[in-house]
């Protein structure tokens, strides 16, 4: 059974590496991310959002759904710690 | 469980530093949309000030000043503020989190500020509450 899990893990890892090999080189100026999205943010973000900080404009305006998700993740982590670790009742005698 | 430190040096330095750390945290949150910074970073700095207080003065002292119930409420209040800003845009007739319709000057900047404040509140309260929960567990 152990070997089955090992084989499954290796197969999944191999598939992921195989998929990552096809990605454009890091920093490649002709990759889609650098030739479509970035110029739009650099050229238009100030006119569209009236905010000088491009990073915040992307995080809080263009991709604010994503940031809402991130905040919810932090919230969920706090709630999980609360549910697992906090004592809600005073134990008698201790 | 962390108890109060004996050393007067640690206690005095912590007491002197905490207001400055908190002021800097508020600056990072409020200035997040026009300079580097934002809700996550500012929230963590704010939480660090409370954690420093807990290390220097003990958990009970900090709990006495800032109750753990208030922390729990703040954790959800931040997410509520964030999602509430989105719903407000929805009620004013635009898409969810499309700040252009908010009835203030520079609506997009103010909308971003509102959600950064929400993120900051949630991150601060979550960090401090996790810290307290982990250390209270015996």
Image (tube, coloured by chain):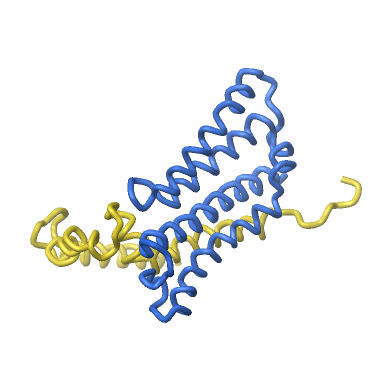
Chain colours: A yellow, B blue
Q: Residue B60, how many percent across, how many down?
A: 74, 39
Q: Residue B109, how many percent across, how many down?
A: 37, 59
For this view, does B64 lie left or right of residue A68?
Answer: right
Q: Residue B9, how many percent across, how many down?
A: 61, 18
- Vertically, is B19 above or below B95? above
Q: Quadrant of the N terminus of chain B?
A: top right
Q: Quadrant of the C terminus of chain B?
A: top right
Say which residue appears at 44% left-offset and 66% top-offset: A69
Say which residue appears at 24% left-offset and 59% top-offset: A46
Number of residue marks: 0
Q: Nearer the viewer, residue A81 or A20?
A: A81
Say which residue appears at 25% left-offset and 65% top-offset: A48
Residue lying furthest bottom: B93
Residue lying furthest right: A93
Q: Nearer the viewer, residue A32 or B98?
A: B98
- Vertically, is A58 above or below B22? below
Say which residue appears at 48% left-offset and 57% top-offset: B119
Q: Residue B86, how many percent across, how many down?
A: 46, 71
For this view, does A91 lie left or right of residue A81?
Answer: right
Q: Nearer the viewer, residue B113 or A25?
A: B113
For this view, does B68 lie left or right of residue B86?
Answer: right
Quarter of the rendering containing residue B2: top right
Q: Nearer the viewer, residue B50 or B127?
A: B50
């Amino acid at each position: 059974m152990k070997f089955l899990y090992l084989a499954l893990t290796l197969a999944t890892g191999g598939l992921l590496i195989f998929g990552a090999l096809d990605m454009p080189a890091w920093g490649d100026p002709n990759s889609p991310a650098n030739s479509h999205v970035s110029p739009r943010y650099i050229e238009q973000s100030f006119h569209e959002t009236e905010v000088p900080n491009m990073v915040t404009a992307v995080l809080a305006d263009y991709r604010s759904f994503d940031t809402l998700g991130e905040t919810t993740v932090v919230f969920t982590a706090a709630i999980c710690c609360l549910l697992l670790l906090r004592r809600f009742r005073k134990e008698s005698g201790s | 469980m962390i108890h109060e430190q004996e050393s007067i040096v640690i206690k005095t330095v912590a007491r002197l530093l905490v207001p400055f750390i908190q002021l800097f945290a508020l600056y990072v949150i409020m200035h997040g949309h026009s300079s580097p910074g934002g809700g996550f970073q500012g929230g963590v700095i704010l939480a660090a000030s409370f954690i420093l207080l807990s290390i220097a003065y003990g958990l009970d002292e900090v709990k006495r000043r800032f109750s753990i119930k208030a922390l729990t409420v703040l954790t959800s209040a931040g997410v509520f503020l964030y999602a509430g800003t989105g719903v407000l845009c929805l009620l004013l007739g635009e898409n969810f989190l499309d700040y252009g319709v908010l009835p203030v000057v520079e609506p997009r900047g103010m909308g971003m500020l509102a959600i950064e404040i929400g993120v900051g509140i949630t991150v601060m309260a979550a960090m401090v509450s996790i810290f307290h929960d982990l250390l209270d567990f015996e």
